[in-house]
Image (cartoon, coloured by chain):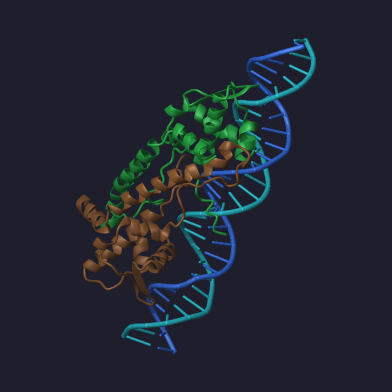
Chain colours: A brown, B green, C blue, D cyan
DNA sequence: CTACTCGTAACAGTATTTGTTACAAAGACG
DNA sequence: CGTCTTTGTAACAAATACTGTTACGAGTAG
């Protein structure tokens, strides 16, 4: 009814996947398959492969056919900002879809004014995401168990 | 191609509308019509009425049939956070759509862990939006002219 | 060769945002 | 009282995004 599916669960899913791989590797395994991860996340393996493919482009994970996925960096060296930037290239806020009336004072100047604000907002958002590493996330997860 | 329409322009449009009303009133007019505002924003009047209707619920503006819209508070007393909260009730990030595997350590603990992070991120976002008033926006707009 | 898994295209279903038309409702005013 | 203006909303279409799903080709290991 008001489940708000507009919001992205991509960061949640991806952080979940990476944390799972990290814990699995820490327990002595080489690689994790997308199906194993998908079982924990409760989704389809293709969803996992799609997201992890983005992370591979960003150099956070690597994969091998017939085997599975592995971390390139340690969990402590990956922040949520790294993950966010790998999977969410777009901004949170957008300017006008259609160019406002340039004859109007407000229509002329509102774009740059709002853009300046949005830049600071996104910087604050990124700064906050950078504070948390996946090691922090795993610590919280294990503490809750 | 890469226009990123996923991002919301609602905050931009609404801030534009309020700033326009504020300037119009400052020039001696009582009310502004949705059609006047829509001309400056370059959109349909119904889009303006829909967004301003949300703001009316939040007590930021008022309207009269056959007349138009007016500010309830001064521009200096309205922050972008006020506007944001009036039109964007949902969070930026969402948790899993389907409940993750509760048998898995990660699946069990990842939800609360990410929720805690998201809460701080949204707090930072709100804090940043609260720093700017519509008076600040109007000042920027007039400075650019 | 066989089996396993990744890599990816293709598609459907759902939801949101935006733009648009249409029309009823409420006031202002002569 | 009748007319005109504008709001208040419903209804609909188009564009976009996200998620889930099936299908199948492409590597790699044993």
Query: In front here: A68 or A121?
Result: A121
**Residue A95 visible in the displayed image:** yes
Name the spot of residue A22 as percent of width and height, x first.
27, 64
Name the spot of residue A46 as percent of width and height, x first.
44, 65
Task: Give left or right: position of B99 versus B52.
Answer: left
Using the rendered view, name the quadrant where residue D10 is placed: top right
Q: Is residue B24 above or below residue A141?
A: above
**Residue B9 visible in the displayed image:** no
Query: In front here: B30 or C10?
Result: B30
Task: Give left or right: position of A18 versus B63.
Answer: left
Name the spot of residue D25 as percent of width and height, x first.
52, 79
Q: Residue at x 54, y 25 (%)?
A: B26
Q: Residue at x 58, y 37 (%)?
A: A105
Q: Is residue B89 above or below residue D23?
A: above
Using the rendered view, name the quadrant where residue A78 is placed: bottom left
Q: Is residue B29 above or below residue B141?
A: above
Query: In front here: A113 or B130?
Result: A113
Using the rendered view, name the quadrant where residue B33 is placed: top right
Query: In front here: B85 or A52?
Result: B85
- The count of marks equals 0
Residue furthest out toward the left: A143
């Amino acid at each position: 009814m008001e489940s708000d599916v507009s919001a992205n669960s991509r960061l949640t899913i991806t952080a979940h996947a990476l944390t799972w791989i990290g814990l699995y590797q820490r327990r002595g395994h080489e690689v994790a398959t997308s199906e194993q991860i998908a079982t924990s996340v409760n989704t389809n393996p293709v969803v996992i492969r799609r997201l992890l493919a983005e992370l591979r482009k960003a150099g956070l994970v690597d994969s091998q056919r017939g085997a599975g996925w592995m971390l390139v960096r340690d969990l402590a060296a990956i922040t949520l900002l790294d993950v966010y930037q790998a999977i969410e290239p777009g901004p949170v806020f957008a300017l006008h879809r259609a160019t406002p009336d340039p004859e109007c004072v407000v229509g002329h100047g509102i774009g740059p004014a709002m853009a300046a604000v949005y830049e600071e907002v996104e910087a604050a958002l990124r700064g906050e995401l950078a504070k948390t590493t996946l090691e922090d996330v795993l610590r919280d997860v294990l503490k809750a168990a």
